Image (spheres, grey):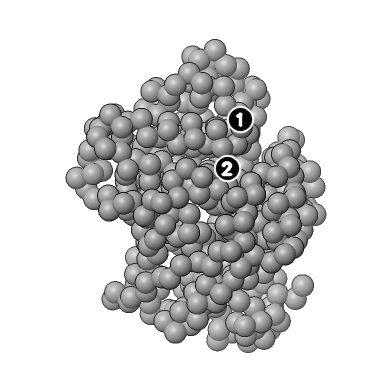
Amino acid sequence: MDIATRVYNHKWKIDPIVRSLIDTDFYKLLMCQSVFRNRRDTHVRFSLINRSKHIPLADLIDEGELREQLDHIRSLSLSRGESTWLRGNTFYGKRQMFRPDFMEWFEGLRLPPYELERKGDQYELTFEGKWPEVMLWEIPALSVLMELRSRAVINSMGRFELQVLYARAMTRVWEKIEQLRDIDGLSIADFGTRRRHGFLWQDWCVQAMMEGLGDKFTGTSNCLIAMRREVEAIGTNAHELPMVYSALAKDDAALAQAPYDVLSDWHDEHEGNLRIILPDTYGTRGFLDRAPDWLAGWTGIRIDSGDPASGAETAIRWWQDRGEDPQDKRVIFSDGLDVAKIKELHAQFSDRTKVSFGWGTLLTNDFRGLVPGDALAPFSLVCKAVSANGNPTVKLSDNPEKAMGPQAEIDRYKRVFGVGEQTSQAVIV
């Protein structure tokens, strides 16, 4: 594919940023099914949060164009082929992962309305309604904002300038792949949908990984690309579930139990499949110290904040203390990864546990230093659930720079979950 020419010639109705309801991360659909079956009437509000305040999105992105893209997403519905793929494909060794009642609902879904307002040099973008409906806005909303920013930067570039830009970016990706292909036992997947440079670029990166890494490339989190390229769709669950369950808790005792209620429902939903723990929503150490014994039997843990080596060491000690063999478990690293950190972590842990990597933004959006002013460098944009049934949500994580929620509630959650001193780390993406 000649991406440079496609970008140079594009009109958005030919190349809409989001072209399918399954142009999203696999874990969103898995979580959506769980929410649909367990908490479908919960009223949730999601909001866009630009952690990189130095990026003036409202100055860069035309409001009319943003609305046009968001309105286009609201017109989308599942195609027959997409429905057939979800209903009949095998995911993680299980056929019919998505149940008939959920699929009937999903096939009739159109995403609900959005609220958009300019506030200074930023946009306030929110989605409010029943949880299973509004949660599916998260990934497409992020994709739209990220790609409109990319388009704003490259809009003034000529064809040859674009060809050189993408040639340099392709060379960078391929050089990274060449460094990774020599790692024995590497297991790595694309997790780059939410903050990608653009759909075409993510698709190119996935194809490059397929050719360059062979069996070491395990798949992509993006359902549409997984379907088109016939690779595995990868993902389990995210912080959204414990954040909303916790916001619904009636008192401190219920709050302390909420993260484990999430995983109990998840276990029941998937009949023992997809058993990966994401422990850092309210601090990994406290989560594991209070975890019920049955969680130690799960397949593995995803490390998504804080120092990744410390998180892996904590998980290994926890398994050992619970009589489990860490070499039978899987640790998935997924926070701000690039080649040097992947190589370092693999060397440190591959002989002690099964190691996997979810490579995100610095795979699908590493244009650092390629244009003047570093105007295409990736930045930290998130879309999070901010309230549930009128109650504010809170996220602490293992990095206090990623904490979110009203300060009084953050303090309460730290008390309930026994979160002590935390070490701040720069939020790269």
- Label at residue 272: 1
How many numbered badges does the structure rendering display? 2
Q: Can you tell which mark lies on residue 287? A: none
Looking at the image, which is closer to me, 95 or 139? 95
Q: Is residue 246 above or below residue 192?
A: above
Q: Is residue 69 above or below residue 382?
A: below
Which residue is pictured at 39% across the width and 22% down the height? 289
* Disc 1 packing (10 Å; few <14; some 14–19; many ≥20): few
The percent coordinates of residue 429 (x first, y second) are 47, 55
Q: CA distance from mark 2 to mark 1?
A: 12 Å
Q: Position of residue 361 (x, y in %)?
A: 55, 57
The label number, if any, that marks residue 236 in the structure image:
2
At mark 2, the secondary structure is loop
Determine the residue positioned at 38% across, 77% down.
58
Q: Nearer the viewer, residue 274 or 97?
A: 97
Q: Hey, which residue is sitting farthest left in the picture?
A: 408
Q: Nearer the viewer, residue 156 or 64?
A: 64
Question: Quadrant location of the N terminus?
Answer: bottom right
Q: Is residue 183 among what the camera can see?
A: no
Q: Residue type at mark 1?
A: Gly
